[in-house]
Image: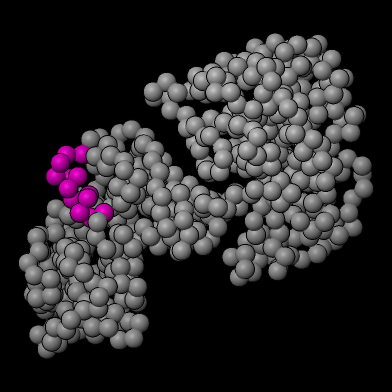
Amino acid sequence: MESYLNLAERLVERRLLSDDELERVLKLQHEQPASLTRLMVELGFLSEDDLLPVLRDHFNIPLVSLRDIPAVPLPIEFSANLGEFLKTARMVPVKVEGRDLIVATSDPFDIARLHALEVASGLRATPVLAKEKEISARIEALFGSTTTSDNTQGAVGREIEGAVDEEDVAHLRDMASEVPVIRLVNQMLVRALESRASDVHIEPFENQLKVRYRIDGILHEVEPPPRQLKAAVVSRLKILAQLNIAERRLPQDGRIKIRLAGKDVDLRIATVPTLYGESVVIRLLERGQIFTQLETIGFPSDILEHFNGMILKPHGMILVTGPTGSGKTTTLYGALQKINDPGKKIITIEDPVEYQLSGVNQIQVKPQIGLTFANGLRSIVRQDPDVIMVGEIRDAETAEIAVQAALTGHLVFSTLHTNDAAGAISRLLEMGVQDYLLSSSLLGVLAQRLVRRLCKSCRKEVSFSNIDSNEPELSLPDGNLPQQVWEAVGCNICSGTGYLGRVGIFELLPVTSEICKIIVQRADAGTIRSLAVQQGMRLLRDDGWDKVRNGVTTVAEVLRVTREEA
């Protein structure tokens, strides 16, 4: 906007535009967003012959006559379906010089479409000025007759509330199928994969479009696509996921199997309507990249030994607890892989099935047709399984069936959303599970979190005294503070974050005979936790401090993921 105003002031100074005319143009632009320079010409306040020399001086770019430049065949990157986009943008490629694409335009303010053209071509767009009539003639010479661009512009640039009519759907499909949009979406996904992102968030706001990558559990904002291409980008993703692009009033979910940068990737697409359009979250699941060994995810040796002993039991229930995104599913998959052999039948019911496990029967929850965790679990028990994995215990019915399955000779794995291991026992009792049944069936509860792992290429050792010691949470349970700790710095390898990957911190509560007794007495979580600690249970933060001492992570990370314990 500032550049626009500077140009307008220059036009007024040269007496090519009056103050009244400028005021009228600015008012009209506020009411109906459009290019300021094009409004000036369309309203008759300024001729193109007068405007282009001023634009040339303002941007310091050449003014050319396309009549003097012969039309030449364009590179293979430019297909015929680019014609509609180029006519909408009112620009045309002239020639290629090395990695530079010379582009003729009458509106150098349109940076967004120049960027889209760069994405489509893979070249750096260098603008030159030319008359619109000459640009239109060149487009027609290169691509043939194209339809008017006004309707396409409207389909891409405006928010369509509620259901979309057939004409709008057709425009969205056309835009979503154009080369610039396809390349833009592919580039966004490839960059996310290269950045080790687990999720891509595409979020519309009143005056901007945000794109954020979740890397190692933390959201990082990246350069978004041009806002006017938002509808086309969302439509492209919905088409790939076989979702209804005409429906913008309801949330939708879909999956895509795609190959990016030589890797097979599963994409989970979730859309939800917001005040300023559809928000999209893409979960990237790289096939073959799941942890298959429990030893690789950060288990301390003593906890791993006890946990391995539990999962080798013939029957009983094992729970893994923690907030969303704490690695519970990865741990359960690792456990199933460890005990998976031809002599055992393993069935899972999940929402969603994130990774496919060889030799394991996996069921996807579908509540819309009545396939809930509870109903699915009833059917699983009749399939003669040895091991059952329930993605999550969400209600009393599922909890009751899981406990009964554990009591009748099945090894049952499941998850709960609680802050610590002791809290899982209290949660099940609150759901209505009988205390004597729970004490008889439960083998143990594993609580976990994920902390970011320090980048070994740039981490820096510092004195613990340099850490903010006024923070009361920094005192360790044994009072034995380390002399030296490590801090994140940032380098090219870790993209400047100082962290590379994540590792788990754990606490394991085995259900001993003493724990069984206080479960039957319906003891609260605090009492259960205290007894477990007396029996040798190490808390989440204890494991976190060990990883701080060993230079695996930082004090800040441990505090971030365990703060609710304080």
Residue 60 visible to the viewer:
yes
User: Does 171 lie within the magenta span?
Assistant: yes
Rendered image quadrant of residue 6 = bottom left
Q: Which residues are magenta?
A: 164-176
What residue appears at the point 46 percent right and 63 percent down from the top-left corner?
A: 262
Q: Is residue 145 above or below residue 274?
A: below
User: Does 189 lie within the magenta span?
Assistant: no
The reply, left or right, for residue 207 in relation to residue 383 is left
What residue appears at the point 66 percent right and 52 percent down from the top-left corner?
A: 502
Residue 57 visible to the viewer:
no
Rendered image quadrant of residue 270 = top left
Q: Position of residue 36 (x, y in %)?
A: 21, 64
- The majority secondary structure of the magenta stretch comes to helix
The reply, left or right, for residue 368 in relation to residue 425 is left
What residue appears at the point 79 percent right and 51 percent down from the top-left corner?
A: 547
In depth, the one of 55 and 157 nearer the eye is 157
Please say which color scheme the image uses.
one colour
Q: Position of residue 172 (x, y in %)?
A: 22, 49
The reply, left or right, for residue 331 in relation to residue 363 is right
Q: Residue furthest bottom?
A: 68
Rendered image quadrant of residue 405 = top right
Q: Position of residue 440 (x, y in %)?
A: 76, 16
In depth, the one of 195 and 114 nearer the eye is 195
Q: Is residue 481 above or below residue 253?
A: below
Q: Position of residue 525 (x, y in %)?
A: 77, 22
In depth, the one of 416 and 233 nearer the eye is 416
Q: Is residue 290 above or below residue 532?
A: below
* Quarter of the image with the N terminus in it: bottom left
